[in-house]
Image: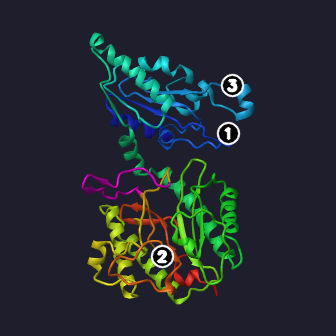
Amino acid sequence: MTTFNKRRERFLAQLGDVAAIIPAASLVTHHADCEHRFRQDSDFWYLTGFDEPDAIALLLPFRPLGERFILFVHPKDPALEVWQGSRCGIKDAVKYFGADLAHPLDEFSQRLGDYLVGAESIAFRVGKHSKVEEIVLGVWSAQLDMASRRGLAPYSLIAPCPFIHQLRLRKDPEELERMREAARISVEAHELARKVARPGMNERELQAVIEKHFLEKGARGPAYGSIVATGDNACILHYTANNAPLRDGDLLLIDAGCSLEDYYNADITRTFPVNGKFNSEQRALYEIVFAAQQAAIETICPGQNAEGVHQAALKVLVEGLLEIGLLVGSVDEVIEKGFYRHFYMHRTGHWLGLDVHDVGAYRLGEYPVDLQSGMVLTVEPGLYISERLPVPEGQPEIDDCWKGIGIRIEDDVLVTDDGSEVFTESAVSKVEDVERC
C-alpha cells in the first residue's frame, strides 16, 4: 500500500458517512496570458499525489469497495499537450494514482449527484474553488429539493479541513525524510552564503547564491520569498526587496529555505556580521537571541505545547534586554504588559510541512494543543531594534548604538518520542562559529 493509499484510508476512516470533495489547484495567470509555475493544493496533494491542475477527488467511505476514491481529471489532448506538457489522462489516473474510478473533468457536474447518494453530509471547503463550488452547491440544492420525495439527501455542508489538517499535523516517516532532505539542501545554501558574503556585495547576489544551490540540488526553488536583509533592513520582518549593498560593520539576516518537487519545505534563518566580527552591541543582542532559542528548543517534547515554547524563548529575551538596559522593570511585568513588543513582535515558531506555515491548530478553544511525536515546528526568536514602533511609556529611549540591529535565528525541529531532533543544526549559529577569523 502506497503512502497516499494509507493517508486516504486514515482520512476515509474519519469521515463516516460524509462525502468529501477535494479540488486541486488551478493555474494562476500573470502578464495577461502567461501562467505561474503550477503549485498543487497541499490538501489535494496529501491525499492523492496527483500533480495536475483542476482535478477533483471524491472520497466516499459509504460507497462499496471499488467506488470510494474517484478522480475527475483533464483527459489526454495531444494538441494541448504540445503547449502545456503531457497529461496523465483517465486510464493512468487509475493505473498510477490508485483511483478506483476516473472520469473526464467535464463530467463532474453530471456524475456528482449519483456519487452523493447515501451521503449524510458533504465535506467541501467553500470560498476557495469558485467554479467547483457552484457545481457542488447546485447539485446539493437539487438533492435537498428532492429530499421529501426520496427521503434521502446530504443535509449539511461541513469543512474537510479539520479532518485533513489533523492528519497532516503529525508527519509520517516518508514525510520526515523529505523534510530532512529539504533542510539539508537549505543548510548547505546558508553556509555557502555565509562564506562568500563580503562588504560591497549586494543582497541580491547572495539571494542568487542561495537559490542557485536550491536548483542545483534538485529542489523546485525557494519555499517562500527569500529574505536577504542587511543592517536596518533586517528589522523589516518580511523584507524581500533584496537590493541593498552589504556594508562593513552591519549584520546580515538571511531567512531562506527550499521547497522540494513534492512540496516539502525547510525554513531557516541565520544572522551574521558582514565583515566576520560582531561589535559589542551586536554580540550582546545575538547572544540573547541564541540563548532564547536554545531555551525554547530544550523545552520541546511530547506534552509541551507551542505556547510553552514561545514563553521559554520570551522569558530569556526579556531577561537579556533588562540586563543590558534596553528594558526596565521586572520580567513578569514586562511580559504581562507587553513592554517588549517594540523589540519582539512575533511568535517563536509555526508548524512546518507541505506548507511553510503549515496547517494544524495551535489551540482548541482555551486549551493549547499538546506537542506529539511527528510534529515539526520552527523555533525562531528574534530582536529588532529600530524606530518603527514607539517605545512604550516608562521604557527607556533607544540609544543610537543599538539602532538598526535585527537578529533572528530559526531552526526546524521535529518532536520525537523522548525530546526533539533539530533538522537544521548544521547551519552554524554559535557566536564563535559564526565569526570569521
Identify the residue at horizontal 34%, vertical 72% (top origin): 312
Tell me, yes or no, whether the highlighted magenta stretch contains residue 362: yes
The quadrant of the picture occupied by the C terminus is: bottom right
Q: Dot 3, how many residues are within 10 Å of its Cα: few (below 14), some (14-19), or many (20+)? A: few
Image location (x, y in percent) of residue 20: 40, 31
Q: CA distance from mark 1 to mark 2?
A: 40 Å
Q: Nearer the viewer, residue 253 or 389?
A: 389
1 or 2: mark nearer the eye:
2
Q: Nearer the viewer, mark 2 or mark 3?
A: 2
Around disc 2, counting alpha carbons within 10 Å, would you say few (fewer than 14), some (14 to 19), or many (20 or more)?
some
Q: Secondary structure at mark 1?
A: loop
Quadrant of res 11: top left
Mark 3 to mark 1 CA distance (whole Å): 24 Å
- From this view, report whether residue 150 is shown above or below residue 365: above
> Which of the two discs, 3 and 1, sits closer to the camera?
1
Q: In the displayed structure, does residue 79 sit left or right of residue 298?
A: right
Determine which residue is flagged by label 3.
Answer: 77
State the image quarter where residue 205 is shown. bottom right
Q: Secondary structure at mark 2?
A: loop
* Place of residue 183 in the rendered image (x, y in percent of width and height, measured from the top left): 55, 61
Kindly identify which residue carries mark 2: 387
In the image, is residue 296 part of the stretch drawn in magenta? no
Label 2 amino acid?
Glu
How many marks on residues?
A: 3
Q: What mark, if any, has residue 32 been given in the picture?
A: 1
The type of residue carrying mark 1 is Ala
Residue sitting nearer the eye, 73 or 425: 73
Any part of residue 426 in sight: no
Labels 1 and 2 touching (C-beta < 8 A): no
Residue 57 at x, y percent in the picture: 48, 31
Of residue 251 and residue 290, the one placed in the foreground of this image is 251
Point out which mark residue 437 bears. Answer: none
